[in-house]
């Protein structure tokens, strides 16, 4: 699609934002710097391409700055004034604290309370923030999420304990290679190889080696990426959706190949002990711990953790009561509506609080299992499992889109913006509006 043809993003409530100055072409360079910095930071925080486009369009339109943005998972095309810039970017893991801070900053810029040059400086500071949790807590969350997944996948207490130990090695290998030039592209496959080999050895304790291997890499599985790709495709962002699915395929093949290679190289040890059963009634408690761990991994703010668990509890009850694609759809719908409703009450963007709930439905782990079966030449079961993963992701995407349609995640209410005046109909603008600067 040519840049001039991009007209799919509406600017919400544009006519209610204030105008304080006439257009000044000398200030365009500052707005261009802001647009590049904001779009890059929001993309790096794991926001979807539709969110990047809509958020930047809202801010530029509010200040009457003429501009166009087109986002994909691997590139940003930004035009402000008579100049454009194309940026090569990488898909990023969710950083919900950064998304929240960036959108609060964008509201200040849209109100005219923060000039673009000062906003750029603050964006750089926000990007340097390591997040609300120290590395030790993040590592513990990785282990808890993996062990909890083993229980939710039907494992025993022995499986959970073995998964916790194996996931420590998985995390270490993935983190180390992910920061090493030349190995970063192979980090997922290498981590899966180590996890698979250790899972084969863990069979001596009575643990199920396939389940332990799968649960140990479940945090690396691209479940959210798969769901986001399905949602972007359904929303008409076909190039972005296709790029997401290509990334999903690359990760799934690496993980499945690593697990298959480990199974071929390391024989499973014979069990020397009986597996310990899980304590009766422990599953809801384990699910709550797993949600907290996933919330830490996606950097939910500390103050939002109780709300995250509450939303996940509703999602878990619905998905558990209806164990099918319909249950996944209704669970995603409930999580989205609750998160957006909380955002409306608080007057801030909180839609990301649904992400840990969506991750609990783990379509990514199903995809890993399906690809592994295909690599093992079990074509029919592999295709059935892969189709099941696609169905789960599609159901989640449908639930998310339906939830946003029922209760959208809105910009700040017009009554909260002092000095609001009318501007031309926002539907006349491609992505923003005519130029105005501070």
Image (cartoon, rainbow, N blue to C red):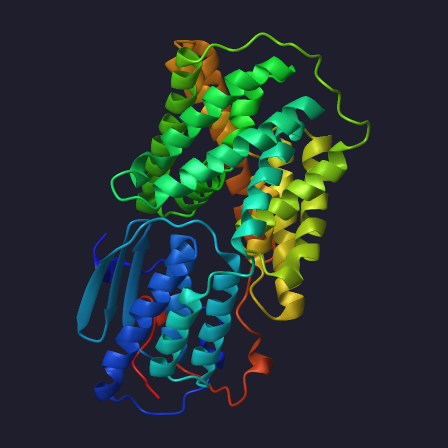
Q: Is residue 155 visible?
A: no
Residue 34 drawn above or below residue 41:
below
Q: Residue furthest bottom?
A: 21
Left or right of 370 on screen, residue 74: left
Which of the 4 quarters of the picture holds residue 423? bottom left
Which of the 4 quarters of the picture holds residue 332? top right
> Looking at this view, is 148 or 225 the one in front?
148
Residue 81 locus on image (x, y percent): 22, 76
**Which residue is drawn at the image coordinates 55% and 64% (left, top)?**
349
Residue 110 locus on image (x, y percent): 44, 78
**Which residue is drawn at the image coordinates 53% and 33% (left, top)?**
167
Residue 146 locus on image (x, y percent): 58, 35
Residue 358 drawn above or below residue 363:
below
> Looking at this view, is 150 or 64 the one in front?
150
Left or right of 351 on screen, residue 77: left
Left or right of 320 on screen, residue 128: left
Q: Residue furthest left?
A: 82
């Amino acid at each position: 699609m040519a840049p001039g043809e991009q007209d799919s993003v509406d600017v919400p409530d544009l006519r209610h934002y204030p105008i304080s100055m006439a257009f000044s072409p000398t200030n365009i360079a500052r707005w261009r710097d802001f647009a590049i910095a904001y779009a890059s930071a929001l993309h790096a925080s794991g926001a979807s391409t539709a969110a990047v486009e809509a958020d930047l369009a809202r801010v530029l339109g509010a200040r009457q700055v003429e501009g166009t943005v087109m986002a994909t998972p691997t590139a940003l095309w930004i035009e402000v004034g008579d100049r454009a810039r194309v940026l090569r970017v990488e898909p990023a893991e969710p950083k919900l604290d950064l998304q929240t801070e960036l959108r609060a900053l964008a509201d200040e810029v849209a109100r005219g309370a923060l000039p673009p040059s000062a906003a750029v400086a603050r964006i750089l500071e926000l990007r340097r923030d390591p997040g609300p949790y120290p590395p030790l807590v993040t590592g513990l969350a990785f282990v808890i999420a993996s062990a909890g997944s083993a229980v939710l996948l039907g494992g025993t207490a022995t499986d959970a304990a073995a998964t916790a130990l194996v996931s420590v090695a998985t995390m270490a290998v993935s983190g180390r290679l992910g920061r090493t030039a030349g190995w970063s592209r192979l980090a997922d496959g290498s981590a899966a190889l180590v996890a698979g080999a250790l899972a084969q050895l863990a069979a001596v304790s009575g643990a199920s080696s396939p389940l332990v291997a799968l649960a140990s890499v479940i945090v690396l599985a691209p479940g959210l990426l798969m769901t986001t790709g399905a949602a972007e495709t359904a929303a008409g962002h076909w190039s972005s959706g296709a790029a997401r699915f290509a990334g999903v395929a690359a990760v799934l093949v690496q993980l499945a190949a690593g697990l298959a290679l480990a199974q071929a190289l390391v024989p499973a040890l014979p069990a020397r002990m009986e597996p310990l059963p899980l304590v009766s009634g422990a599953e809801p408690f384990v699910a709550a711990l797993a949600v907290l761990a996933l919330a830490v991994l996606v950097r939910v703010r500390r103050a939002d953790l109780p709300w995250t668990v509450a939303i996940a509890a509703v999602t878990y009850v619905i998905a558990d009561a209806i164990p099918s694609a319909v249950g996944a759809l209704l669970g995603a719908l409930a999580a989205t509506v609750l998160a957006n409703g909380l955002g409306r009450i608080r007057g801030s963007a909180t839609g990301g609080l649904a992400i840990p709930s969506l991750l609990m439905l783990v379509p990514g782990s199903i995809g890993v299992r399906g690809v592994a079966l295909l690599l093992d030449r079990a074509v029919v079961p592999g295709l059935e499992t892969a189709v099941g993963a696609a169905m789960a992701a599609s159901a989640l995407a449908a639930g998310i889109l339906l939830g946003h349609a029922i209760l959208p995640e809105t910009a700040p209410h017009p009554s909260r913006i002092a000095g609001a005046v009318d501007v031309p109909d926002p539907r006349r603008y491609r992505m923003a509006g005519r130029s105005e600067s501070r």
